[in-house]
Image (cartoon, grey):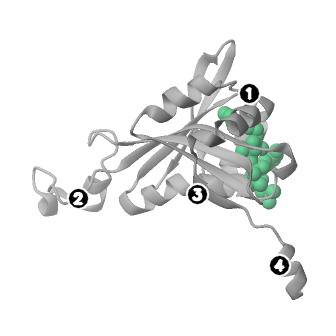
């Protein structure tokens, strides 16, 4: 690649979503997501201390976003440590120095139509996974049954359909998709 084409080439970058981004993010959401979050939905969701919003930018323009919620998993739900370390090693009580596995819920993600299929969704969805690789756990996403693109996108990212939730998007079913680490 020549020096000039390297200089003009645009690379998406990911950073935290800030309040100034909201008009762009809401417009993008209304354009493509199908969940129809309004500005107040973003504000209410992101006000919560366990919820994270990130945006992808190209040349200072917001071209995608992701919102997810993180939480520690109850020991009874995903006994990762018990699987890795038998009772003989762990004893009756798990020691405090093992952080509990994380449970992440993907709440919303959207990429501007002009930037879809450029790997930006993949770039954003890898962000919450970093927490899983540190501590183990799972990410879950509830996807409307008619959103085939999202199902294929998640499948490509290693998610598996785990459950059908009847009529959870109005009259539409939702597929619960999980990625476990
Ligand atoms: C689903 C979405 C987030 C994917 O983002 P993206 O940046 O276009 O996805 P990527 O370029 O990272 O795609 C990675 C892989 O996922 C799969 N994939 C993504 N979109 C796909 C589509 N429309 N059809 C089939 N496979 C698809 C492909 O395997 C793709 O790899 P490839 O391009 O090398 O074939 C994006 O299409 C989008 O914003 N959709 C509308 C919003 C939405 O539905 N949000 C969910 C609300 S529940």
Position above or below: 171 against 163:
above
Q: Name the residue under label 3.
A: 126
Disc 1 + disc 3, Cβ < 8 Å: no
Q: Is mark 2 on a helix, strand or loop?
A: loop
Q: Estimate the spatial distance between the alpha carbons at disc 4 and disc 3, rounded to whole Å.
A: 26 Å
Please rate how many residues cluster around mark 3, counting C-alpha atoms within 10 Å: few if below 14, some from 14 to 19, many from 20.
few
Residue 44: % across, % down: 50, 26
Q: First in sequence: mark 1 or mark 3? A: 1
Q: Is mark 1 on a helix, strand or loop?
A: loop
Q: Earlier in the sequence, mark 4 or mark 2?
A: 4
Q: Name the residue under label 4.
A: 7
Q: In this view, does 122 lie to the left or right of 132?
A: right
Q: Position of residue 111 (x, y in %)?
A: 75, 45
Q: Quadrant of residue 30?
A: top right
The numbered disc on residue 34 is 1
Q: Distance between the residues labelled 4 and 1?
A: 36 Å
Q: Indicate left or right for 163 with 137 as reference.
A: right
């Amino acid at each position: 690649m020549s020096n000039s084409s390297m200089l003009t080439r645009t690379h998406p970058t990911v950073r935290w979503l800030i309040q100034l981004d909201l008009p762009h993010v809401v417009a993008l959401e209304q354009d493509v997501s199908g969940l129809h979050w309004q500005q107040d939905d973003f504000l209410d969701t992101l006000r919560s201390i366990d919820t994270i919003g990130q945006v992808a930018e190209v040349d200072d323009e917001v071209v995608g976003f992701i919102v997810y919620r993180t939480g520690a998993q109850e020991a009874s739900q995903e006994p990762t440590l018990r699987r890795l370390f038998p009772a003989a090693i762990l004893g009756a009580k798990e020691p405090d120095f093992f952080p509990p596995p994380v449970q992440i819920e993907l709440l919303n993600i959207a990429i501007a139509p002009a930037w879809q299929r450029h790997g930006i969704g993949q770039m954003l969805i890898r962000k919450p996974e970093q927490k899983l690789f540190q501590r183990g756990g799972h990410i879950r996403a509830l996807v409307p049954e008619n959103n085939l693109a999202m199902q294929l996108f998640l499948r490509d990212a290693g998610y598996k359909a785990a459950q059908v939730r009847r009529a959870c998007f109005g009259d539409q079913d939702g597929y619960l998709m999980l990625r476990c680490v």
